[in-house]
Amino acid sequence: MRKELGITQQYLLCALNKNGKLSAWSVEQQICFIAGALLELLKEGCCEEENRKITAKRVPEEDIDYLHPLYVYLQDKPRKINAIASDYTFTFTAKRMKELLDSVGTSLVRKGCAGEESSGIFVESRHFYPKPEYVDKVIQQLRAELLEEGTMSEEMIVLAALLDTGGLLKKYFSKYEADQLKKRIKEVRKSEEGAMIKSMMDYVESMIIAVSIAGSAAK
């Protein structure tokens, strides 16, 4: 099993709130979590985009088996981005989101990066509490790569973009640092090397629009 954390694991470490959950009030944070997982599956060749639909191709290997719930969902049939967003965030049971959260959260516990507690009598609710030193390690790596001169890894840029869209940069960075990070993200997105960043942001924006439309239609 690889030692480093994947994009989805790093994002969740930074996004979990004091109650050990993703914010129920931020659709953007939930969508960024799903987008990160989807991008990781695409990057690892476990699924691919065909005719504007995401198609499952290969079962995730052991080092990313925390993405298995999303892969199984995609394996059922090819799905468009807006359908994925709606199925995971605009539902009455939140079963799919819970399964993926529990899977990624459990992987963090196995790696010693988080603690876990359970609550609930009839329906178990699991809460994951990141260990501060591991969150700090992720943030310091972000700070080193994006705020200092030098080579920027694709993964760190994607993570920064997800945290930005989820409104989480201000949780860890000063206003000046956050502004600098956003500036670097924009620069990379416009460059020839920023194809994955542009693709990821397109996914996220499509998901947010889809959920907003679904929410408005239900009112």
Image (cartoon, rainbow, N blue to C red):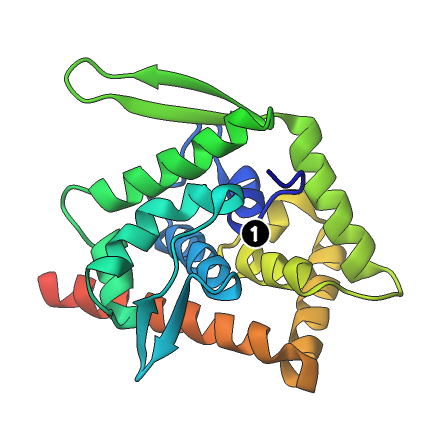
Q: Which of 44 and 22 lies nearest the eye of the viewer?
A: 44
Image quarter (top left, top right, bottom left or bottom right) of the N terminus = top right
- Residue pictured at 65% horizontal, 84% vertical: 190
> Local crowd at mark 1 within 10 Å, few (<14), some, or many (≥20)?
some
Regarding residue 30, the answer to whether it shows in the image is: yes
Helix, strand or loop at label 1? It is helix
What residue appears at the point 38 percent right and 76 percent down from the top-left corner? Answer: 49
Residue 106 sits above or below residue 72 on the image: above
Seen in the picture, residue 106 relative to 116 is either above or below; the reply is below
- Residue 186, position as x, y percentages in the image: 65, 76
In the visual, does 100 lie left or right of 144? left
Which residue is at 31% across, 81% downward?
52
Is 166 placed left or right of 99 in the picture?
right
Tell which residue pokes out farthest to the top in this image: 121
Q: Nearer the viewer, residue 191 or 187?
A: 191
Q: Is residue 156 left or right of residue 84?
A: right
The quadrant of the rendering that contains the C terminus is: bottom left
Q: Is residue 122 above or below residue 50?
A: above
User: Which residue reaches farthest left?
Assistant: 218
Query: Residue 197's image quarter?
Result: bottom right
Query: Eyeballing the image, is 135 above or below 87?
Result: above
Q: Position of residue 36 (x, y in %)?
A: 48, 57
Answer yes or no: is residue 219 visible.
no
Residue in the image at 21% along x and 70% along y = 213
Number of marks in the rendered image:
1
Q: Quadrant of residue 131?
A: top right
Q: Label 1: which residue? A: 7
Three-letter amino acid code of the residue under disc 1: Ile
